[in-house]
């Protein structure tokens, strides 16, 4: 049976869970109220940090789900994503619109990676 490693575990959730060579990240959000580009950059920095803590990096992301509070922000979010995403290693990705935990959040990103 494989060990399960939980990273930044709190009373409600862990920010990342590693098991069987797979890393699942919780949904990452940026500073409430910040512009979409700033929130996206902050989210992707958190993704980098959590993946490093798990022992992997963004070239090993296999799937990304991106939730936007407003699809009107799609192009601006993509501009930040495209600068961050490692060409030749881009994951399968889906983007949708959803009501996020607070109206001050404009983007939430959930990724799955391998070690």
Image (cartoon, helix red, strand yellow):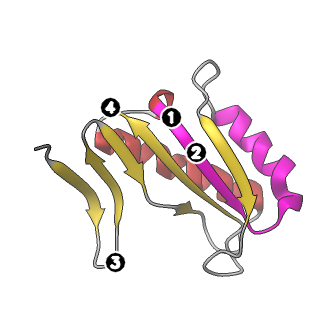
In the rendered structure, find residue 115 and report the number of the disc placed on it. Answer: 4
The quarter of the picture where the C terminus appears is: top left
Q: CA distance from mark 4 to mark 2?
A: 16 Å
Disc 4 is placed on an element classified as loop
Residue that sits furthest to the top in the current view: 88
Mark 1 Cα-neighbour bin, 10 Å: few <14, some 14–19, many ≥20: some
**How far apart are the two marked residues, 1 and 2, measured between alpha carbons?**
7 Å
Q: Quadrant of residue 8?
A: bottom left
- Labels 3 and 4 touching (C-beta < 8 A): no
**Residue labelled with disc 2:** 64
Identify the magenta region: 61-84
Tag 3 residue: 12
Q: The N terminus is located in which quarter?
A: top left
Which numbered disc flags the more N-terminal residue, 2 or 3?
3
On the image, the x and y values in percent for residue 12 come to 34, 77
Q: Which numbered disc, 4 or 2, marks the residue that appears first in the sequence?
A: 2
For disc 2, the neighbor class at 10 Å (few under 14, some 14 to 19, many from 20) is some
Given residues 38 and 110, the one toward you in this image is 110
Is tag 3's residue or tag 4's residue first in the polypeptide sequence? 3
Judging depth in this view, the residue of 10 and 67 nearest the camera is: 67
Cα distance, mark 3 to mark 4?
A: 25 Å
């Amino acid at each position: 049976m494989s060990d399960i490693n939980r990273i930044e575990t709190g009373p409600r959730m862990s920010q990342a869970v590693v098991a069987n060579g797979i890393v699942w990240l919780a949904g990452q959000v940026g500073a409430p109220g910040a512009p979409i580009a700033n929130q996206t950059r902050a989210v992707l920095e958190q993704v980098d940090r959590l993946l490093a803590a798990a022992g992997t990096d963004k070239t090993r992301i296999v799937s990304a789900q991106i939730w936007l509070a407003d699809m009107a922000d799609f192009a601006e979010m993509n501009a930040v994503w495209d600068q961050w995403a490692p060409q030749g290693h881009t994951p399968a990705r889906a983007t949708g619109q959803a009501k996020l935990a607070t109206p001050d959040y404009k983007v939430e990103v959930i990724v799955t990676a391998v070690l």
